[in-house]
Image: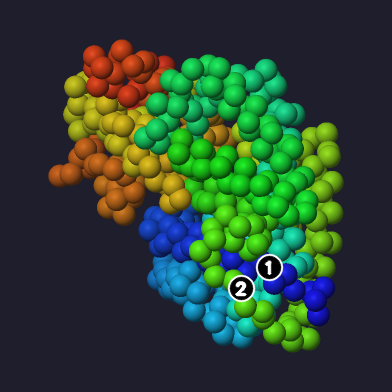
Amino acid sequence: MEWFGAADYEFARQVLQRGVAACYLIAFISAVNQFPVLLGDHGLLPVSRFTAHVRFRQSPSVFHWYYSDRVLRILAWTGATLAAALVAGLPQQGPPWLPMLAFLLLFAGYLSIVNVGQTFYSFGWESLLLEAGFVVAFLGSEQVAPPLFVILFCRWLLFRLEFGAGLIKIRGGREWRDLTALYYHHETQPMPNPLSWFAHHLPRWFHRSEVVGNHFAQLVVPFFLFAPQPIASVAALIVILSQFWLVLTGNFAWLNAVTIVLAFSAVDDGTLRALLTWLPAGQAAPDAPLWFVLVVSLATGLLVVLSYWPLRNLFARRQLMNASFNRYHLVNAYGAFGTVTRQRHEVVVEGSDAADPADETGWRAYEFRGKPGDPVRRPRQFAPYHLRLDWLMWFLALGARDTRWFEMLLVRLLEGDRPTLRMLRANPFPQAPPRYVRARLYRYRFSTPAERRETGEWWVRTDVGLLVAPITLSWRSRA
């Protein structure tokens, strides 16, 4: 069945399967480390309360039947182990149903986590990882040639990801149209990394060039992913290079990693061997069994049908960003940063063990792992790992409506809850929890080169005022 197989995309299959599996590995380890604290039995937004009000059919998850932190850890460690095996390429050496089953188990397990994850799992890259895992499940094993339908659907996924993001920007804030968006983005993005300060201080002509390059990479290049080779491979290379610049200058969990992996669906073995002459020639794979052809055809047919809604969304006046059109997060709409904020605000949580909360000398700040806090602390690199609490703190500073999780965070700090404190970088009250906690709002900006030479500070901050006045545990009991 020559029409079914894409024998010249074996390297692409290896990158797609192992790369997506690596992102699942990170996601499951993140769940082990963070889910029980954020959403567990004693979490900020317990799963049990969510499943009591949301039915299984609305948000499918095994945790509708039973949840405990122990069960969550078993599921997550099982998923991490399975993902590690796929990264090593072990299931891919068996029959084509083996990697298919492995990826579908990863998909089902992570879907169970995402669908009860509430605001902590509301990010677009959760849906992206789920969709990518489901699609690459049907790439088969080394015993069959990569199915052409699946390779093309990976490109369609990449097209929606990039072109959707480009349209969101053009339809969004004026700063993307007048080419000034990158004057602010490196400073105001959710979680700057060690190079963000340097990127922010590049010349303005460079920032304008960044915006032009972004528009080209997201609005023009995606169409060439479906062109004949080697044009498609060149288009993929442009996407990869643009994503590496985002990796160098920001922390966006596994969003950029998955995008880079998907771009390899447009790179054929022939182009790679022309560039890397030392690569061995591929071996012809036997014809795929009939059952595999039927399963892959049915799966891709389903995905094509589900593509109607995101395709319509691309051309809608009110384009949805990072939206799922079904409860299984298959064939979604993507996009980010339709507008870029020009000022950065940060919420700084403080505690005091003084008898009088009016005594300003008693207040000490809690430091988070990734989000800006102490001005002298240089931003860190965490991606592709995802610090969920830090990200929500960024949305909180923007005026997020749902603040239940933050109220519970303050309670846990007053209780001196050890699992919650381990989510933070430092606990300023190691001996006993504070009497009071409060939250202040600051405006942050990157220091200038002269300011950093003089003070050693990466950030300069200005006090805006109280966001939450001093509270105690007695406040919580009255509430």
Q: Which residue is mark 2?
A: 282
| Identity, as a three-letter code, of the amino acid under mark 1 | Asp
Q: Residue at x 25, y 41 (%)?
A: 426
Residue 472, how many percent across, how many down?
31, 36
Neighbour class for label 2 at 10 Å: few (<14), some, many (≥20)? Answer: some
Give x and y (percent) for residue 251: 46, 41
Q: Is residue 309 above or below residue 295?
A: above
Q: Is residue 471 left or right of residue 318?
A: left
Q: In this orientation, does residue 40 appear?
A: no
Q: Which residue was labeled with disc 1?
A: 8
Camera-side residue: 37 or 373?
A: 373
Residue 356 circle label: none
Mark nearer the N terminus (1 vs 2) = 1
Residue 339 falls in image quadrant: top right
Nearest the camera: 323 or 258? 258
Residue at 52 percent across and 35 percent down: it is 395
Compared with 193, 327 (above or below) is below
**Left or right, 378 with reference to 195:** left
